[in-house]
Image (cartoon, rainbow, N blue to C red):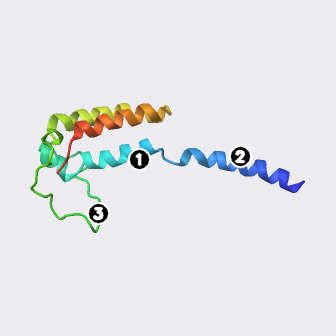
Amino acid sequence: MRISLVLPAALVMLGAVGPAFASSCGEQIATIERRLDSTGAEKVTGIEPAGGATSSNSPKALDKTPNVKPTDPTTTATAGGISEARDLIKTARAQDKAGDETGCNDTMTKVKQKAGALP
């Protein structure tokens, strides 16, 4: 009889912890925001992000952005594209908050296209 009391309590605890996990779309938003606030984006827009450029602080990160162009010229980042990407992220964040995972993922695909290949 003790087991029958423990299982429902465990399920309640699991349900309470569930919302604390970030959605995959939420993780995408955070990743792309870091890219849009990077030194590479600053190089494209000429504008330093409000909080200063971010860094991955990865030991594998390059000391400076490489001076190369993407192999596909249509993926070249532009200041206008980065601005549009920032606006789309607001939409994606609202979709993620509303639980619209498909809509959020679709919007994030557009964000990535607009942002282009950042240096």
Mark drawn on residue 79: none
- Mark 2 neighbour density, 10 Å: few (under 14) some (14–19) many (20 or more): few
Residue that carries the numbered disc 1 in the rendered image: 27
Does 87 sit left or right of 10 as displayed?
A: left
- Mark 3 neighbour density, 10 Å: few (under 14) some (14–19) many (20 or more): few
Residue that carries the numbered disc 3 in the rendered image: 57
Where residue 77 appears, as percent x and y from the top left, is: 16, 42
Residue at x 29% of width, y 59% of height: 56
Which numbered disc, 2 or 3, marks the residue that appears first in the sequence?
2
- Mark 1 neighbour density, 10 Å: few (under 14) some (14–19) many (20 or more): few
Residue that carries the numbered disc 2 in the rendered image: 12
* Cα distance between the residues tagged 3 and 1: 18 Å
- Mark 3 belongs to which amino acid? Asn
Residue at x 22% of width, y 46% of height: 49
Instruction: Count how many numbered circles sit on residues in the image.
Output: 3
- Mark 1 belongs to which amino acid? Glu
Which numbered disc, 3 or 1, marks the residue that appears first in the sequence?
1
Along the viewing direction, whichever of 74 and 91 lies nearer the viewer:
74
Where residue 8 appears, as percent x and y from the top left, is: 77, 47
Q: Quadrant of residue 68?
A: bottom left
The answer to whether mark 3 and mark 1 are in CB contact below 8 A is: no
Farthest residue, direction left: 67
Residue at x 59% of width, y 46% of height: 18
Along the viewing direction, whichever of 114 and 56 lies nearer the viewer:
114
Along the viewing direction, whichever of 1 and 55 lies nearer the viewer:
1
Where residue 69 appears, as percent x and y from the top left, is: 11, 50
